[in-house]
Image (cartoon, grey):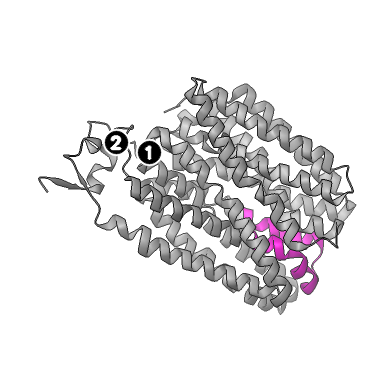
Amino acid sequence: MDEKLKYSLLRGELVDTQSIWTRHEKRVWFITLLTGTCMLYSTRTTMPLLMPAVAAAQKWSKTDSGTVLSSFFWGYTLTQVLGGYFSDKFGGQRVILLAALGWSIITFLMPTIIWSAASFKSYAIPLIVTIRILNGALQGVHFPSMISLTSQNLCQNERSSFFGLLTSGSAMGTLLTGIMGSFVLDYFGWSYVFRVIGLMGFAWALVLRYYAMAGERNRIINISAPARLCANKTPAETAVPWLRYFSRLSFWACVLTHACEMNCFFVLLSWLPTYFHDGFPHAKGWVVNMIPWLALPPCTFFAKYLTTHLIARDWSTTTVRKLIQSCCFAAQNVALFVMSRTTDFHTALICMTIIIGGTGFHNNAVTVNPQDLAPLHSGSVFGLMNTVGAIPGFLGVYLAGHILELTQSWPMVFSAAAGINLVGWIIFLVFGSAEAIV
């Protein structure tokens, strides 16, 4: 112990220009967390993909479908702050592991739950909604835990780009569901899609536990290495100074702008398969569930490159965040405007691809803004931001189903999303900032 110190004794004492993870550990955790985000979104998008088939089999109305889809986000809002708090305190990897075991098992058992609920007749939808709420609650801790984990183990200038790239796993997961899920659905039926993806999620949880986390148990840091020298630095406060955050307009600009963009993203995430199924019934399922999501990874990487390039040229971080977020909203609103007025399949597909690609810019702007505003409490602050961001998710997804039930009008759904985007755009341009609050 006179030459080496336990890793846990040093976590709070490294200067902020040094990383706790070694280069090898960064690679291990990047691949692990990217794959985990992929599996998270793969399980999350399974129900939207299968909703036309499940609704037809169970004789659900559009309102019933909207209720089942949106109920996921009811649970998603409940655990964001809590997940960030426990991750900041006990370690994000532990929270991610426990949650992953839960949402994987629920996904695997979902066909059994749907079939069993049918025997309860009038209570079938409430029972399924309850399970979906639980599933959402378990998935709600993933991103706050991940941003907490990276903030605690990476130096300041690596955090935003590292986390921004991890969010591209959402597109990979949606692509996995769209391609493999569509194939399994066509040849084996909707129940097998839940089973296969649930098993894959469980397998990833085992990799996390016995590979990535196993490397931390005996980790030690050699204090004789210059890159690992410790500095006298006050540990992060255990209590989050919420009143200081609540009193700043830049905090609320981040939270509300995220909520506005998430409304667009979650509505399309949940209803995209149904939109193409209803409007273009002869379109190939794997095409409409794959092509739009192909745009997200390259857009995320390009936005990351552009952010790094502009900051290296001495642009202020605040200006860069506003510029990147403006690219997101401008592209999405133009595409939503065109999509609400077209009846051509290829035009609709291109517009949907642009909208999903725009989210890659959001992932490198407002999504990483909590690390700018709250470097000491990024997990908790991101959790609150995602809590508020999930509220339009369940309201927007449910209201979209209700609008479609009453009017059968997809243009009304798209116009509402564009209007909410515009509000968020104005808020962030006027009040947004990347200056640390605490």
The kind of secondary structure element at disc 1 is: loop
Q: Pointer 2: what residue?
A: 235
- Report the disc number at residue 26: none
Q: Pointer 1: what residue?
A: 239
Q: Which residues are magenta?
A: 45-73
Measuring from the top left, give residue 105's x and y in whole percent: 53, 70
Measuring from the top left, give residue 383's x and y in whole percent: 51, 44
Q: Residue at x 50, y 57 (%)?
A: 35
- Please state which amino acid type lies under the numbered disc 2: Pro
* Residue nearest the observer in this picture, 105 or 180: 180
User: Is 202 situated left or right of 129 in this image?
Assistant: left
Mark 1 and mark 2: span between their CA atoms?
Answer: 12 Å
Residue 64 lies in the magenta-colored region: yes
Give the farthest residue toward the left: 2
* Residue nearest the observer in this picture, 93 or 354: 354
Q: Residue at x 81, y 56 (%)?
A: 276
User: Is 338 situated left or right of 101 in this image?
Assistant: right
* Residue nearest the observer in this picture, 21 or 310: 310
Q: Residue at x 85, y 43 (%)?
A: 340
